[in-house]
Image (cartoon, rainbow, N blue to C red):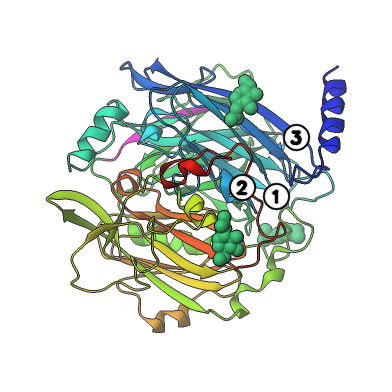
Amino acid sequence: MRQAIFLLFYLGILACLGTFYVNAEDPYRFFTWTVTFGTISPLGVPQQGILINGQFPGPTIDCVTNDNIVVNVINNLDEPFLITWNGIKQRKTPWQDGVLGTNCPIPPKTNWTYKFQTKDQIGTFTYFPSTKLHRAAGGFGGFNVAQRSVISIPYPTPDGEFTLLIGDWYKTSHKILRRRLDSGRSLPLPDGLLISGLHDSAVFTGEAGKTYKFRVSNVGLETSFNFRIQGHKMKLIEVEGAHTIQEPYESIDVHVGQSVTVLVTFDESPRDYDIVASTRFTKPILTTTATLRYAGSHTPASGPLPIGPTYEIHWSMKQARTIRLNLTANAARPNPQGSFHYGTIKVVRTLVLANSQVLINGKLRYAVNGVSYINPNTALKLADWFNISSVFDFKTIKDVPTPGAPAVLGTSVFSTTLHDFVEIVFQNNENSIQSWHLDGYSFYIVGYGSGLWIPNMRERYNLADGVPRHTTQVYPKSWTAIYVSLDNKGMWNLRSAIWSKRYLGQELYIRVWNDEHSLFTENDIPSNALYCGKAKHKHS
Ligand SMILES: *[C@@H]1O[C@H](CO)[C@@H](O)[C@H](O)[C@H]1NC(C)=O
Ligand SMILES: *[C@@H]1O[C@H](CO)[C@@H](O)[C@H](O)[C@H]1NC(C)=O
Ligand SMILES: *[C@@H]1O[C@H](CO)[C@@H](O)[C@H](O)[C@H]1NC(C)=O
C-alpha cells in the first residue's frame, strides 16, 4: 500500500518535471517536523527544551546518497527559527542551507518546507537550529547517509549501527544563556555532557562476535570531547563523508561540530562495558558514560573507566595528523577519493583568518580579522539575487588580519569566483580551542601547527592524503591550514562551531559566484522562498 502511494506520488513528480530542478530519478523522503518547547530534564533538573515531534534529541534522518529530502518544519515556538544541515553540501541549493545569510527565518506559528538532495554524499552528519542560541535547548539530531546499492564500501558490511550524539549541556534555559551573552558576558563551563540526550544512562546493545558502526558526533556548544570504550578498540572508517585509512584507536578526540564513524567488534567476554566521553582542555573535566551491552548480559560494567587525555594539546594534534584519506577507496561515487589530487592544484588566493575576543561598545564580542559579524535583516542570498545594494559589501573584511586595528561590527562577505582554489589559514592566537565550519563544502586539511603561521609552513603541508572535512579544530596558540575548491555556487557560512563565539560575531560568508545564470550551477530561487528585510516587497 505504501509502495503504491509512493508510486502514485512518483508519477506525479514525473508529471511536474520542468518545475522541479532536482533529479526526479532519485527517491524522495518526506518528513513533517513539528517544533515545540517542552520540558526536559537531561541533567535531572527540569528545563525548557526544543522538541521535534515531541523528541529530544530530534529524529534521526536515515537516507541514501542522492535522495531528495523534503522536510516541512512547523515552527510552533514563539520565536523565528531555522534548522541547518551540518555537512550536507546543498549542491546548487544554497537556498536550503538554513542560516540567516541564505534564508529568512521561519516566523513563529508558521511552517516552511526545505527541499534538497544528499547529492554525491555518504557518511555521518547532523542537523541543528542555527538561530538565536536554540541549539542550547535541543532541536538537533543525526543525519546518516548510506551508500547506494551499486556502490562498494571499503569495509565489511556492519551487523548494525548506532548514532551517538554527544555534547556538553547547560541546565540553564537557552533564553537565560542568550541574555547573558547579549549583556556582554561569556558562557560559563557547561554543567555536564550528554550522550544522545541522556546523562550516564544510554545503552547500546549488540551481539557477541558481531561488528557495529558507531556514528559519533559532537553536537555540543562549547567543548571538545574524547570518546572511548572500555576493553574495545575502535577502527576509524570515515570522517564527515571521507573514508579514512582504517587505523585502530583506543580513544578519539571529536571537536564541536565534527562527526567520526568507527567500527567496534564485540569480541570480549559477554557483559556490560563503559562507553566514556570526557571534555578536553577544560578545568574541571566533565565526564559522562553510557553502556555497551552484549545482548543478554546481566553483568554490569566493572573496573576502572578507560583513561583518556585531558589537557594535552600535542597529543590531540598528533592524533589529528594520523587521520588520513584512503586514496584508493571510493566515497559516494565509484571513482577513487584520491583522484582529485588536491596537492597539485594551484592556489589562487590565500585567506588568513585570525579569531579574537574583543570589546565593542564596552561589550564582549568575538571577531574574525577584526570584524564581529552582525546579521542584516535581509538574507544575503536574497540581496545577491535581487541586486539589492547596501546590505553588505566586500570591503568589510580583509584577506589577512590588520594588526592593531580596532575591532568593529560588520557584515563580512568574501567575494570569490566559482572554481577558485583557495587556501585558508585559521590563526588562533588565543588560549582556547577553536572549531571552524564551512557550509556547502568539504575542504582538505593540509596542516596543523603551533604558533604563528608563516608562508614557510607550506613546506610541511600534507599534499597527498589530507582528509576532507566540513569542520576543523584549531588548537590554542596554533594554526590550521585548509585547501578548498570553490565549486559550489552560492553564499556560504564560515563560522565558529563554538556556539557562543558564533553567536557574538565569529562568522562570515563566502560568496561563490560567476555571472553566468545557469541551472547547471545553481537552482532558481524556490517558489516557497521567504522574503524579509529589503527583499520583502520582492515576493511574487
Ligand atoms: C505548510 O504545510 C502545509 C501542509 O501542512 C503545506 O501544504 C504547505 O506547503 C507548507 N508551507 C510551506 C511554505 O512549506
Ligand atoms: C583502503 O580502501 C581499500 C578499498 O579500495 C581497502 O581495501 C583498504 O583496506 C583500505 N585501506 C586502509 C589502510 O584502510
Ligand atoms: C542582477 O544583476 C545581474 C548582473 O548585473 C543580472 O544578470 C540579473 O538579472 C539581475 N537580477 C535581478 C533580479 O535584477
State the SS at label 1: loop
21 on left or right of 94: right
Q: Nearer the viewer, residue 329 or 159?
A: 329
Q: Nearer the viewer, residue 375 or 32?
A: 375
* Disc 1: CA contacts within 10 A as few (<14), some (14-19) or many (>=20): many
| First in residue order: circle 3 vs circle 2 | 3
Question: Residue at 30% across / 44% down in the picture?
Answer: 500
Q: Amino acid at mark 1?
A: Lys
**Residue 430 falls inside the magenta stretch:** no
Position of 495 relative to 399 (above/below) = above
Residue 525 is marked as 2
| Residue indicated by mark 1 | 119
Magenta range = 285-292
> Magenta part mainly helix, strand or loop?
strand
| Residue indicated by mark 3 | 28
Q: How far apart are the two marked residues, 1 and 2, measured between alpha carbons?
A: 19 Å
Question: Residue at 57% across / 24% down in the picture?
Answer: 33
